[in-house]
Image (tube, rainbow, N blue to C red):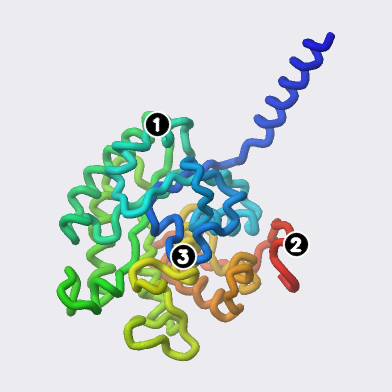
Amino acid sequence: MKASKQLLSSLLLLLTSLTAQADTSVLFIGNSFTYGYGSASRFYRADTVTDLNNEGIGGVPALFKSFADQAGLDYEVALETRGGSNIDFHLENKLGVIGRRPWDQVVMHGYSTLDADDPGNPAKLVASTREMTDFLRSKNPEVEVYLTATWARADQVYVDDRPWTGQSLDAMAADIRAGYDQAAAAPGVVAVNPVGEAWQKAMELGIADPNPYDGIELGKVDLWTWDHYHASDYGYYLEALVVFGNLTGKDPRSLGENECSGYELGMSRSEVRMLQQAAFEQLQSEGRVTADPLEIPRRVNPERCGPGQ
């Protein structure tokens, strides 16, 4: 009798886990530009996502999860990250972790200069993207892969003797995007997340300062953190907004100026609204979202959002 009860209990637990499965699973594969180095975002809401490396990371995946929850979307979010890595690192060392299950969607990117040893050369990114997408499609032929084109680094533009010294941030962002566009030719890649261009859009709109080396203009934010290389909370927040809009097709402005994570990370309503606007304008220019600025119902625990959220 006792054994029968234990068996029944096990079956009920299994049934519960199956019925509780999310509508969509998404895996983030990346490096410090995904896990949020240099910011509070790094360990933000780590309990809401699954870190396959068990390092307690929240980062951009947790921000995406927060946005999805507030939009009423059922996403299971996981991540596999390693600082300073390109996609080839994950191919050589992490396929056993990545391949534990099939994924519905995968978001991934390589090194911030396309190639750490040969800045600006997309060859390694192109080859490793194709190999990784082939592996992911062997687990799920219908997987949707999104490549994140990362931002221009101020330390590569404004500092002497760097690959983009003397050029503009726009030029570096365009070079990075061109490399990702080449990589996006791999079967299974749906689109590129235009994060670098959304950063440039934020500067055009006047919410972000384009040069942290000469001080931050009053009323503007610094998208980079202290090293002028990685992102600040503002920069990672904008990255997550772009990914959210691109994967879901929802206007990032639909999250509203009272969006929960922006509040928790200490952003003003104006800053949240303007960063959402930058993400929207870049995604709209590429035909990835249509205008729908009205706020949609939020389904998060109000205790985690603070007063007035």
The circle drawn on residue 303 is 2
Give the x, y percent position of residue 232: 45, 70
Q: Nearer the viewer, mark 1 or mark 3?
A: 1
Give the residue at x 33% y 88%: 214
**Would residue 139 appear left or right of 261 to someone viewing this image?**
left
The answer to whether residue 4 is seen in the rendering is yes
The answer to whether residue 191 is seen in the rendering is no
Query: Quick one: label 1, few (<14), some, or many (20+) residues within 10 Å?
Result: few
Residue closest to the eye, 239 or 187: 239
The circle drawn on residue 60 is none
The kind of residue tagged 2 is Glu
Query: Quick one: label 3, few (<14), some, or many (20+) residues within 10 Å?
Result: many
Q: Quadrant of residue 22?
A: top right
Q: Earlier in the sequence, mark 1 or mark 3?
A: 1
Q: Which residue is mark 1?
A: 96
Give the residue at x 56% y 59%: 44
Residue closest to the eye, 166 or 133: 166
Q: Earlier in the sequence, mark 1 or mark 2?
A: 1
Q: Quadrant of the C terminus?
A: bottom right
Q: Is residue 76 above or below residue 152?
A: above
Q: Is residue 133 above or below residue 256?
A: above
Give the x, y percent position of residue 282: 41, 68
Q: Which residue is mark 3?
A: 236
Give the residue at x 30% y 69%: 152
Give the x, y percent position of residue 229: 33, 69
**Would residue 231 appear left or right of 256 to someone viewing this image?**
left
The kind of residue tagged 3 is Tyr
Q: Earlier in the sequence, mark 3 or mark 2?
A: 3
